[in-house]
Image (tube, rainbow, N blue to C red):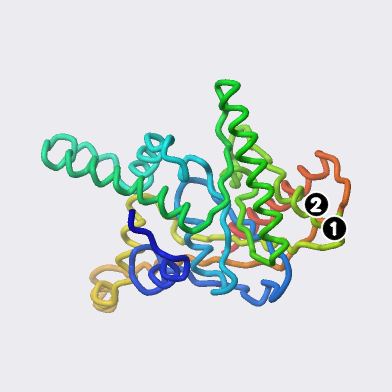
Amino acid sequence: MLSFSYNFLRTLGRTVPVCPKQRPVGLENIPKTGAIIYVYNHTTRRGEPIHLGVAAPNTPKIRFLAEVTIAAKRYLPILRKDIEDSIFPDGFREKIRGRRWANSFYNKLIDFMARYIVAQVNRLDSIVVDLQEPNTDEERLEKQRTNKQALKKCIESLENNIPIAIAPSGGKTHEGIENPVYQTIVPSLASLFFKRGKVVKIVPSVVKENPAIDKKIFWCYLADRIFFYKAIRWILNLLKIKSYKKYRLTVEFLPPLTFENAKPSKPEKIEFVKNLQQLIYSTIREK
């Protein structure tokens, strides 16, 4: 399966309109040396990790924590559905399914995209975590093994000053969600590091979309990266024929935080994560 390097994908994202253009803000807040954990908002299975990876400094490359559903072939059916739900509008899918030849090509395209994502996630040396609810004892043991290995890889990366990136609560970091889950891996890693006499810098990284990107708006963001398209829209706006709405996507890096507690209780970890999320929420709400 064809896959690309970390730096090549960053260059691709910056120069070719294959994803919305990111504008980094607050790069001066990122420490030049030492262990770093990027913590970002990630409310759906969309592109926040991609936006963060493109906006962050070139070196050292970031190791992202990736959910097992995008890294293991056994979860391909789940990944295929996620790709469909994230990219293609419902109306488009209904039309495609009504045409046999088009539906066959469409299914092959989705399958290729799913397999490519799995290959690429592994090619980029992502750290795989399992957040699935186990149904059997075998699945429970497999989940424990996967997450234990992930913790080990996180520590090894931070020891070597390789940044890692984490969504702080299992993909649910916006207000208004039901039954929020507070994953405590960020303070847990910081605590383990502090026991070793080291302090890890935790950099809140806020992906802000204006307007919010959905399946339809996504294509507008891409089109707005094409000079010819932007020129036509600018002329139409100048002639007062059609208003030109600029699409802006920023990745804001906030001043780093620390968690200097060698023996924290679980409530203390949860409180830290709650405060971290609240910081992200308030930054998203800012105009």
Image coords of residue 129 (percent x, y): 58, 43
Q: Amino acid at mark 1?
A: Arg
Image coords of residue 120 (percent x, y): 42, 55
10 Å crowding of disc 2: few (<14), some (14-19), many (20+): some
Q: Nearer the viewer, residue 57 or 20?
A: 57
10 Å crowding of disc 1: few (<14), some (14-19), many (20+): few
At x 61%, y 62%, the residue is: 205
At x 46%, y 53%, the residue is: 121
Q: Amino acid at mark 2?
A: Leu
Q: Which residue corresponds to mark 2?
A: 192
Image coords of residue 209 (percent x, y): 48, 60
Q: Residue furthest top?
A: 136
Alpha-carbon distance for marks 1 and 2? 7 Å
Q: Nearer the viewer, residue 117 or 159?
A: 159
Whether residue 279 sits left or right of residue 230 in the image: it is right
Whether residue 109 sits left or right of residue 277 in the image: it is left
Image coords of residue 91 (percent x, y): 24, 40
Total numbered circles? 2
Q: Nearer the viewer, residue 205 or 65?
A: 65
Query: Label 1's element?
Result: loop
Quarter holding residue 286: bottom right
Q: Dots 1 and 2: beta carbons under 8 Å?
A: yes
Whether residue 24 sits left or right of residue 224 in the image: it is right
At x 81%, y 63%, the residue is: 199
Q: Which residue corresponds to mark 1?
A: 196
Q: Quadrant of the C terminus?
A: bottom right
Query: Label 2's element?
Result: helix
| Image height of 195 relative to 134, above or below | below
Quarter holding residue 106: top left
